[in-house]
Amino acid sequence: MHIPDGFLSHGINAATFVVSAGACAYGVKRVNRNFGEREVPLMGVTAAFIFAAQMINFPVAGGTSGHFLGAVFSSVLLGPWASLIIITIVLVVQCLGFADGGLTAIGSNIFNMGVIGALGGYGIFFLIYTLLQKSRKGFFIALAISSWFSIVMGASAAAIELAISGTSPLKIALTAMAGIHAIIGVGEAIITTAAISLILKTRPDLVTSYVKKGVLREKTT
Amino acid sequence: MKRRLDGLIWIGLGISLMLALFLSPLASTSPDGLEKVAETKGFAGKGGSWKFWKHAPLSDYTIPWIKNEKVSTALSGLIGTLAIFFIALGIGKLIKKSPPVKRILSLLLFLLPLFSTSVFAAHPLITDDTGTQGKGRFQLEVNSEVNYGKESEAGVKTKTTGGEVATILSFGIIDKVDIVLGIPFQWFKEKENGEILSRESGISDISLELKWRFYERDGWSFALKPGATFPTGNEKKDLGTGRVTYSIFFITTKEIEPLAFHLNIGYMRNENKLDERKDIWHISLASELKLIKDLRLVTNIGMERNPDRTSNKHPAFILGGFIYSIFENFDIDIGIKGGLNKQETDVTILAGIAWRF
């Protein structure tokens, strides 16, 4: 989903850059308020894991491949704002160090995967989790659905940007992008759910959004 | 608590490194979702035709000089994963509960070494190479060093700290001959048992050299470098020799991609007013290894005759550092030099920039 240079118009890139930069600035403020000693190394490892996992493309239908994004994964671990920062760090390093994603499109990529993927994905997670009364089952259902949405929504945002830039008509770009990413999103949902459930089994205290909602407290009382 | 978290950090990092090392080479090479859509919907040609940022050292998850695709991907993944870990850790530390001003300052402090360690020029090497600028081309270098030395003899502890900033301008008279002007500025402080013995600073002896690359073939090249220094530094303050000195160096370079070796054998006629030895020889060997595009790991070892008449032991050094080309014509470098014996300065840290135009 990393958009290279040349696909988007400068107007779109500038607009998404401003929104992404604003979101990151606010994110730094929020993270600053919530971060303690233990979150810092966890942030390092989460970012390293996301980078490594993003290298592993898995085949999906019709000669296409997809890879893990990790926006909802890191949101659930460290909160949506820290997740936005992590995704931003990964995207900047991928762009500058590995020529993955264009430098002119960095604002758009952070917007699609960080603002839409991490913040939007976490919003959906939180909504479903709350609707399902924060049960353990509800947690995993919310996790799977929201991580699927984080991919599809991010891809749709990319399609809309492509359309506004005049690269491809909206109807064609949107159906193609959402269609292929609906399949990639299933992979995202499986990996996110499996990874989080593994961490929950070994170190439940690290999954911020699970502990905070008082599920563990319910269990002990 | 903290200890348990630490353990988990290493496990998590270990898993990530294993993913990058063992699974990334097996990843599907099919186009990803966006690339596929761009292909089938006919706008793939719009991207990839130009790139705004052309300096990505590990472009497309490969190390340029490793030809084996799988090894190249695995190692670039390993480097990236480690780099991301430290960058995210550093940024996390910075945004963790600290006042905004301090945060911005420390962010700058954190980013600066990031750029300077990815650093570069033939500096920090002591050993010169046979390279010349080319007719009508200039190179401006600003090289700096800070050094520390400690000695104790018969209960007297001498501590020396000093440094040098040298401005060096090279100009290509013809393709194979450079003229090189060096203007060094030095300072040092000598302390004996904690009391300042001497403290001086000023311009040292200016040097002028010619470098002529007279032979090159099959990766081998040879050059001669005659030169002289002029007594612009005050010898009474230990900033110069007080007389014109002469030198001649014979330089050999052998290139075997991604490696390069340089050998220097030199003789200096050290005319001086300080009762120093006048005949000084020099021998040194350097190697350069291109790690990735634009980043070179350099090592150097060498020895010189001790100008001090009272000693028959000669100072020897070993050096390691990095040279990084930020742009095609702009390099930054950093290095650390250690003395292999008492006669050489204990530790010297070197950093410099080179700009060719």
Image: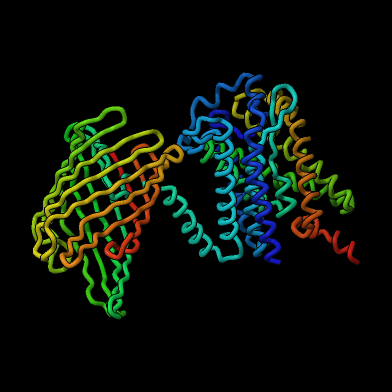
Q: Position of residue B147 (x, y in %)?
A: 32, 63
Colour mode?
rainbow
Q: Position of residue B132 (x, y in %)?
A: 24, 37
Residue B106 in view, yes or no: yes
Q: Pick whichever, B357 or B63, lies toward us.
A: B63
Query: Quarter-wise, where is residue B256 in the image?
Result: top left
> Which corner quadrant holds the C terminus of chain A?
bottom right
What residue occupies the far front of the structure in this picture?
B312
Number of numbered discs: 0
Q: Is residue A29 above or below residue B66?
A: below
Q: Is residue A118 above or below residue B25?
A: below
Apparent side of residue B85 relative to residue A142 in the rendered image (left or right): left
Q: Is residue B228 above or below residue B175?
A: below
Q: Pick whichever, B75 or A138, lies toward us.
A: B75
Query: Quarter-wise, where is residue B79 in the image?
Result: top right
Q: Residue at x 29, y 70 (%)?
A: B160
Q: Is residue A111 above or below residue B273?
A: above
Q: Position of residue A124 (x, y in %)?
A: 79, 45
> Which corner quadrant holds the N terminus of chain A?
top right
Apparent side of residue B56 relative to residue A169 in the rendered image (left or right): left
Apparent side of residue A219 relative to residue B261 in the rendered image (left or right): right
Residue A11 in view, yes or no: no
Q: Pick whichever, A200 or A138, lies toward us.
A: A200
Q: Residue at x 55, y 63 (%)?
A: B100
Q: Residue at x 62, y 53 (%)?
A: A44
